Image (cartoon, rainbow, N blue to C red):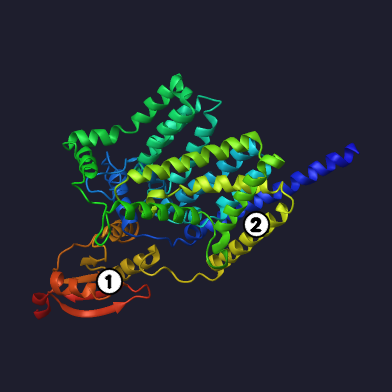
Amino acid sequence: MRKTTIASFISRYKIYGICVIAVFILAFFLRAQESISGNYLFLIDQGRDMMAVKNIVFDHHLTLIGPYTSLQGIFQGPIWYYLLSIPVFLMSGNPVGTVYLMVIISMTVIFVSFFWVKKRFGIAAALFVAFLFAVSPEAIAASTYSWNPHPMWLLILLFIISIFEVRQNKSFNILLWISVSLMFHFEMALGAFFLLASVIYLLAFNRAVFKTKFFFIGVLIGSLFFIPQISFDLRHNFLMARSVMALFSGSNQGLLVVGESNKYLNLVVGHYYAFYGNFKSSFISQGFFSYVPSILLSMLIIVMAFSKKKKLIFKEEKQFLSITFKFVIIIFMLSFLYPFPIRYWFLTGFQTFYLLFFGIILSIFLRIKGGKLLVTVLILFFSVYSFSRLNILYFNPPNDGGTAKIKGKLSAVDYVYKDSRGKKFDLLVFTPPVYTDAYDYLIFWRVKTKYGYIPGHDKNGQFYLLMEPDYEKPWSYKGWLETVIKDGKVLSTVTLPSGIIIQKRIYEEQAKK
């Protein structure tokens, strides 16, 4: 009998082991297609970041601020740029290193969540949590291109672990306040919500944390991460402080765009839809799967309904579900005080709450009669969808991304250099957002590794025009030609497969010669 029990135990853990390996392999390949193919989004934000990193790594100019925010005069902290500097330095300037970093961060989130949940709530809950993270569309997207809000996934996970563990181990105060402080370097808006919500939650439910030395240590270390922004503000006549004051006094409406209402009721309704949209984006919810969020909410209601009679929820699980639920509600209520629309990127990584919460709910649902069947069917559908995604990503990719991805941009840069046949030339670039940082960096990198000549930006002699059409306003580049360029005899016009237009011109005086 004892041998049978031991054999059953070993067999069960073999199955769990296979499932764990399968989940991590699935997670990796869902995230790695862009980095493996070397074709990833490289838009205005990525170009801006790479030019800032160039200043640090190659020009040796340090910075006190990070990316700009939606409000004029307010900047994220600089740690994002210094973080990107590591892979850029190691890859000799190749921007693909930044995408590798995103994959590493995303996989780290799955590893940390799996092992922590396993320690606290068991292997079944850990598997469900890891699986939900593995197939979450937004979690996957956060690993396919570099963007400053993406590290929020890891910071929010560390925050959730800290605020749960600090009940019994006050030393987690240190990690808690460090994670909150670091948020101001990646997504300041959500970081501010977390800071206020943390104080409110702890005052209401766990005041004891404020009485320990670890609280003061955590706050002290966390405050060090604000030194760069404070230094910048002191050197620039309190630019950020004045911008914040203008924001809440109502004199600065920088977060509203044309046509948006600033009526309070409309804002509150908008905030609700922003949070609900963030919840839905946590899970596969396209087409047939559009009912998944509703199914998960129904499962939650069933678990709550049976929990008292059946004693389905263990003490640790109940405490975790309670803490995460309360914290989400506090942040949602705080949004009522926010006088502007909540942009979708403000909540990047907030899906972590829902993935952890419902991963544990799925493990609890196994204890209900018939629950195993429903959970198995749900996981099976998720798996089929995910493997169909793998087939599309690796065997039938829809396109090369046109002007949005790096291959299209690089092909345009390479075309110009090859067409010039080693002669010096000028190059003028048009992009719909106006800013040309993406091309500026790619030219710098190509020159560093291949061509050895940076083109000028004038219209002397033979020059090239590189134009990205705006698919919503396809005529816009023509206005640029008529108002900014004007001069030069057109020698040739080529539209590349990416849709980018290359025009070669020669200045009129040269043409006459």
Residue 112 screen position, x and y as percent: 56, 41
In this picture, residue 488 sits left or right of residue 297: left
Q: Farthest right residue?
A: 1
The image shows residue 358 at horizontal and vertical percentages of 58, 48
Q: Who's the residue at 58% across and 35% down the image?
A: 319
Residue plotted at (24% across, 33% down): 231
Q: Does the rendering let one see residue 86?
A: no
Which quadrant of the view contains residue 13? top right
Nearest to viewer (mark 2 / mark 1): 2
Question: Which amino acid type is shown beneath numbered disc 1?
Answer: Arg
10 Å neighbourhood of mark 1: few (<14), some, or many (≥20)? few
**Towards the viewer: 223 or 499:** 223
Q: Residue 379: which disc? A: 2
Measured in 3D between alpha carbons, the distance from the residue under mark 2 to the one under mark 1, in whole angstroms, is 57 Å
Q: Identify the residue under disc 1.
A: 421
Q: Earlier in the sequence, mark 2 or mark 1?
A: 2
Judge whether 469 appears above or below 436 on screen. Answer: below
- Residue 79 percent coordinates (x, y): 35, 40
Residue beneath the point at 47% across and 46% down: 153
